Structures are given as structure tokens and as C-alpha cells.
Image: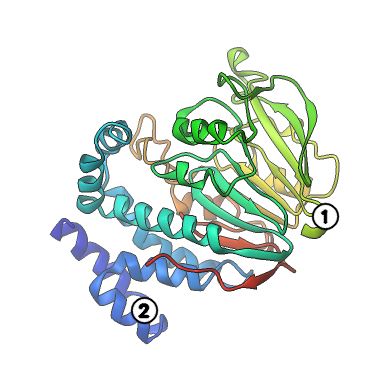
């Protein structure tokens, strides 16, 4: 890790060492980002810890601010062609190392978690989420290095649109090779959908709505799949709605009360108004720290954790959560059959 970056991260981490406990205290002295990840995983959103989580996320934010969009682009282009180059980038850039560790740990946790009742949700990266119930496991908008390792675990893969930060070609191919269903707007060999419809995959029902990436742009209309997923009785009849990059509030019209709403934090959608109108039990503002976007003007589209917290500041903390890479969230009432196994 670059010494200057590490020094800055250590300073930020020391802000919370006093209340993180002995184990996190020792870890923080060795690796502030590891301490941050440890603390966040031990303290998922619970309606009371929004301020504390925001403070800890500042450490990860600081690391991401040190990674240029150009360096991330070089890293991403090498995923399928130069594993050694990618491994070196993950060793060099603290943010990429954090993303690697968070992704691997989440994949391992997804593989070993058994849900007795309810729904477990993982944020993988950007707007990519994995959902697991007692009888189903599905992913939406999964992207990033290594996500193809999730293919054995997933029963179905859903993709809202064809922007590269919302899908993984290796994962799609891995799913198709296993004969597993994949829904997209465009990808050959998948189930291609371009109009509202209903589908059933095992124990889950998927209602597909059509949204607008940029509703003020005539060329960006009706180009977004939005998924309303009914997870079934063994999941407590939970209903999840993933909007992708839809910007049109009037097109978000769930057919039933929602347990979880996932929205883009800044694509033109009035996020707080949408949450109030739809009134889900929980809402995730997503598309945060997309490292392929620049944090600097004129196209400052790498939205920060602070931006997300400010966007939902008027919504009660019990109804909104800002997740970081690899974190798991359990729908209230969810029961797990056994503790999840952590990656070594």
C-alpha cells in the first residue's frame, strides 16, 4: 500500500478505534481498511447506527478517492486477459484490495449461508445484489471481477440494462453454460425482454416493468428493466423492487407493498420523494463508489457515501440503509440455519 495513502487511512481509522473493541483495535493498527470492513460487518444497519456507520465509511471513501478512473479502467480491462496485472493492482491500490477482500468474503458467505426463513441480501458492487431465501438464490446487476464464481450458487440472474457497470459477461456465460436462466435486454442466448411481462423461476415470481434511464432525453426512454420479485411464502412473502438506473418516478409502480426498494442515488430520480411515495419497509440508495466513474467534474459520477446519506437524511434511519461492498443485510424476521462461514 502506498505509504502516504496508508498514513491518511490510519489517521481516519484512529478516530473510531476507541469504540471498536480490542480485536478491531489490534486490526486497525495493522490495516485501517481491514478494521473498517470488520466493524461494518459486525454492525449492519439497524436504525440506530447511521451516524457511526457514516463515520466508518469515511475510511473506505478516503481510499477510493485516491484511485483514479484511469487506473481503475486499466485494472478492469485486464480482468480477462492479465490476472497477474489485476492481482498487482489489488496489492497496490487500497480500494481495490478492499473490494477484492469484500467480494471474496461475500461469495464465501453466500455459498455457506442457509436461510431458514426470510431473505438475506448482499451488496456486491455498484447496484449488484444477491438475494437468498430458503429455496432460491438470485442476483440482479452483478458486475466486477470474480462475480462469475457466483454462478454455481445462483438460480437465476437478472440484468436491468447493458451498461458495463451493471453486468458481467463472464458471469452470464457461466450461467448459460450451466443451463440457468438469465434475463437481459440485449445479450445473445439469454431471455431477452423489452416489454413489461411476468415470469416465474422456481419459487420466485418476477414482474418486469420498463423504465427510463434518462426520462428527459428522448433517446433514453423505455430502455431499463425494473424487477419486482415476489420471494414466496418461505421468505415471508417478501417483495423486492430493483429499479436499476431508472430516473422516472412515475414508472415505479409496484403491484404490492414492498419490503425492499433499491434505487439509483443520483440518476435524476427524486430519491427521498420516491421512498416516501412507494413506502417500502426498507430502501437502499445504490450505485455508490462506481470506480469506473470519475469523482471529479465535469462528470463527477462516482457518488460518495456522504452523498447517499445526505440524499436520504429526511427519511427515518430505520427505513433506509447505505451498504458498502460485501455487506449482508437481513430482512427483519429472517432466520439463518447456521452461522455463515467467513473466507480465510
Is residue 164 positioned above or below 101 on the image? above
For image coordinates 35% across by 71% down, the residue present is 35
Q: Which one is nearer the viewer's eye here, 152 or 253? A: 152
SS for callout 1: loop
Q: Earlier in the sequence, mark 2 or mark 1?
A: 2
Horizontal side of residue 73 vs 139, given as left or right: left
Picture quadrant where residue 121 is located? bottom right
Is residue 147 positioned above or below 196 on the image? below
Q: Which one is nearer the viewer's eye here, 44 or 119? A: 119
Is residue 339 positioned above or below 296 on the image? below
Numbered circle sitting on residue 24: 2
- Please rate how many residues cluster around mark 2, counting C-alpha atoms within 10 Å: few if below 14, some from 14 to 19, many from 20: many
- Please rate how many residues cluster around mark 1, counting C-alpha atoms within 10 Å: few if below 14, some from 14 to 19, many from 20: some
For image coordinates 64% across by 56% down, the residue present is 314
Please name which of the two marks, 2 or 1, marks the residue nearer to the observer.
1
Q: CA distance from mark 2 to mark 1?
A: 37 Å
Picture quadrant where residue 97 is located? bottom left
Picture coordinates of residue 98, whole percent (x, y): 34, 56
| Extreme residue in the left direction | 3
Numbered circle sitting on residue 254: none
Picture coordinates of residue 264, whole percent (x, y): 58, 40
Tag count in the figure? 2
Amino acid at each position: 500500500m502506498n505509504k502516504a495513502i496508508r498514513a491518511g487511512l490510519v489517521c481516519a481509522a484512529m478516530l473510531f478505534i476507541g469504540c471498536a473493541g480490542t480485536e478491531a483495535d489490534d486490526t486497525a493498527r495493522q490495516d485501517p481498511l481491514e478494521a473498517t470492513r470488520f466493524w461494518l460487518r459486525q454492525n449492519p444497519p439497524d436504525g440506530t447506527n447511521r451516524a457511526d456507520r457514516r463515520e466508518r465509511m469515511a475510511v473506505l471513501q478516503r481510499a477510493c478517492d485516491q484511485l483514479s478512473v484511469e487506473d481503475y479502467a486499466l485494472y478492469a480491462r485486464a480482468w480477462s486477459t492479465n490476472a497477474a496485472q489485476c492481482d498487482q493492482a489489488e496489492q497496490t491500490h487500497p480500494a481495490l484490495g478492499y473490494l477484492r477482500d469484500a467480494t471474496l468474503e461475500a461469495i464465501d458467505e453466500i455459498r455457506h449461508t442457509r436461510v431458514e426463513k426470510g431473505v438475506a441480501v448482499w451488496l456486491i458492487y455498484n447496484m449488484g445484489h444477491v438475494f437468498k431465501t430458503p429455496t432460491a438464490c438470485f442476483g440482479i446487476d452483478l458486475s466486477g471481477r470474480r462475480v462469475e464464481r457466483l454462478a454455481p450458487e445462483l438460480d437465476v440472474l437478472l440484468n436491468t440494462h447493458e451498461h458495463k457497470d451493471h453486468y458481467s459477461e463472464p458471469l452470464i456465460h457461466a450461467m448459460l453454460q450451466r443451463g440457468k436462466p438469465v434475463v437481459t435486454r440485449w445479450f445473445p442466448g439469454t431471455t431477452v425482454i423489452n416489454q413489461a411481462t411476468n415470469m416465474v423461476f422456481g419459487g420466485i415470481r418476477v414482474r418486469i416493468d420498463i423504465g427510463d434511464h434518462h426520462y428527459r432525453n428522448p433517446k433514453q426512454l423505455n430502455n431499463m428493466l425494473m424487477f419486482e420479485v415476489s420471494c414466496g411464502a418461505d421468505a415471508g412473502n417478501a417483495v423486492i423492487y430493483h429499479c436499476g438506473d431508472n430516473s422516472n418516478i412515475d414508472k415505479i409502480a409496484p403491484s404490492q407493498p414492498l419490503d425492499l426498494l433499491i434505487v439509483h442515488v443520483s440518476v435524476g430520480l427524486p430519491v427521498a420523494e420516491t421512498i416516501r411515495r412507494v413506502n417500502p419497509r426498507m430502501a437502499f440508495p445504490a450505485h455508490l463508489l462506481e470506480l469506473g466513474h470519475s469523482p471529479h467534474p465535469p462528470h463527477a459520477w462516482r457518488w460518495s457515501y456522504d452523498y447517499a446519506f445526505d440524499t436520504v437524511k429526511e427519511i427515518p434511519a430505520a427505513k433506509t440503509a447505505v451498504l458498502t461492498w460485501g455487506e449482508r443485510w437481513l430482512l427483519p424476521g429472517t432466520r439463518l440455519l447456521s452461522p455463515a462461514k467467513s473466507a480465510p
